Image (spheres, grey):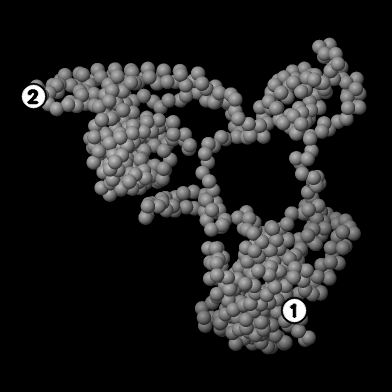
Amino acid sequence: MHEVLRDFLHKFVLVYIDDVLIYSRSMADHQRHVMEVLRRLRTYHLFLKAEKCLFHHPSVQFLGFIRDYSSVTSPLTNLLRNKPKSLTWTPAAMQAFDTLKQAFTTAPLLVHPDPELPFVVEVDASTTGVGAVLSQQQGNPPRLHPCAFFSRKLNPVEANYDIGNRELLAVKLALEEWRHWLEGAKHPFTVLTDHKNLEYLRAAKRLNPRQARWALFFTRFNFTLSYRPGSKNIKADALSRLHSPDIATKDPEPILPERLFTNPISWSEETLPKLNASTDGPPACPPGLQLVPRSRRTNLIHSTHTSLGTGQPGITGTLSLLRQRFWWPRMAMDVKRYVQGCRECAMAKTPRHLPSGKLLPLPVPNRPWSHLGVDFITDLPASGGCTCILVIVDRFSKSCRLIPLPRPPTALEMAECLFNHVFRYYGLPEDIVSDRGPQFTSRVWRAFCKCLGVAISLSLAYHPQTSRQTERKIQEVGCFLRTFCHSHQESWNQFLGWAEYAQNSLRQSTTGLTPFQGVLGYQPPLFPWDGEPSDVPAVDYWFRESERVWGEAHLQLQRAVQRRRTTADLQRSQAPEYQPGQKGLAQQRNPPLPLLIDDGPVYLVKEVLDSQRRGGRLEYLVDWE
């Protein structure tokens, strides 16, 4: 719009982005000016919306600003609330009315920016927001007049920036806000800040990635950073604190830290006899003890349990301390309920009770290769171009397949590997148990299993017991490879087939059969052939024997699961029953350390959309918060 109306600017036209103001000294001049502007807009195929246009008006509202306008006018807006039939004029309303009249008739009034004059940008940042003022030296004599104001609240990530980065963010946001005036300005402009270190930004040799991106953005502008003390940077400082919470609304807090207090009882000892006299105690109250009224019991338990002098004892310790001087009915139950709900004890103390939750075993399969468990052995020495082993375990026969891979596969490569090495030999499974690796949580893997009608069972985070059979098989394979490849680790790939053969030949304690017998119905020879006919069954006999073996194996598996469940439940307690909306503490063993990326902020991820492996590292496609 500036380019289209450039020869009319400041003669009879003012432009602010897409707002056009036409002013004239007489009606005849005004009609001529309006026609010239309309012809120019039609020449450049720019359209106006009639509902938003005002023609031949003596005055219009154009780019006005009054700071704290909503706060100033609140007494007046309260008078008009709910459409009252009559207005009650109050002193507060009168004061607001006078304040508005003063604001409309006095400075600081916004002046329209003059591209022929240099700009001044004043910026400041607080802990909650940033503020900026765009000004120019106008008038006779020249005075610094504001052209525009800017204020914005910091989001949670920006609020964690240090003071230097917050001040630099204020500069960046101000230049973004007024880039239509500042980018390509005729004169270099000045940015005033109360953070002296920003003066050396362009000469700095080491910048973090965020500062480097902002520095690249600053190259689009011709400006100088200058320091001004905070006591003189009043306008920008006030704008940056618009979003600060009202300090007067906060509850008073003690100046001394909480750890210096020993949680004294909130009622004096002199009031106890009066309270006891006003409460009809039951005859069971022991002599020498004071009866505590119902309204004081929780405070008394809290003071006794959380005091520095007691060290937050358990149920027995807290109850013992209270019983030295106090008594009330069902005291033990009240103390137990309070201590069990103590958040600090739950987080800091070692649990002495049995783990909660009974054993919930996986379902017992009915046939070989119907329920699988998959996992990886990674970070192996390179052998034949492979550094990883895919371990696939049949949960029915305990048979396994060991497949060497050059690297952990993607979801698509995982699907191809399972089809080529398992599905085409043993048929489609009913369920696959795996951890929560990126291969098994991607949309490609879910779509693949859905098309084949295969259920996906993902283990819980930090709970490898879900796929215990696969983890145990990984341990046994690792032991085999360490035994035979300890002196030539670069050739473990040559021994992997023998490791699979050995694992499938070992008799399993749960079924009493070897994996070969569970799948094939017979045991292949383990020793050199001596010339005798091999013990391979006939077809009819093989079918009958397979059905018998599978039925017996299924029964043995059920018995083994029941034995394991009975043994495990002896060391566990019943899981608690939670109500909807009830809060609890989740125990997380060995949580991962937070990532520090060049001391930058941690961005919140809403959803992981997809992943792929490139150069030995995982890349994620994510949706940011």
Q: Which corner quadrant of the image does residue 349 belong to? A: top right
Q: Residue at x 78, y 40 (%)?
A: 260
User: Going by the picture, which residue comes out furthest to the front?
Assistant: 487
In the image, is 243 to the left or to the right of 276? left
Q: Is residue 414 above or below residue 82?
A: above
Give, as a three-letter code, the residue at label 2. Gly
> Can you give x and y, in whole percent of width and height, for residue 443 in the image?
40, 46
Q: Residue at x 62, y 63 (%)?
A: 165
- For residue 391, which numbered disc appears in the image? none
Q: Which residue does the numbered mark 1 point to in the structure image?
A: 144
Q: Is residue 108 above or below residue 346?
A: below
Q: Is residue 298 visible?
A: no
Q: Is residue 56 above or below residue 391?
A: below
Q: Residue at x 90, y 59 (%)?
A: 91
The answer to whether the residues at label 2 and label 1 have Cβ atoms under 8 Å apart is no
Disc 2 to disc 1, C-alpha distance: 109 Å
Crowding near the residue tagged with mark 2, few <14, some 14–19, many ≥20 C-alpha atoms within 10 Å: few
Q: Is residue 40 visible?
A: yes
Q: Nearer the viewer, mark 2 or mark 1?
A: 2
- Earlier in the chain: of badge 2 and badge 1, it is 1
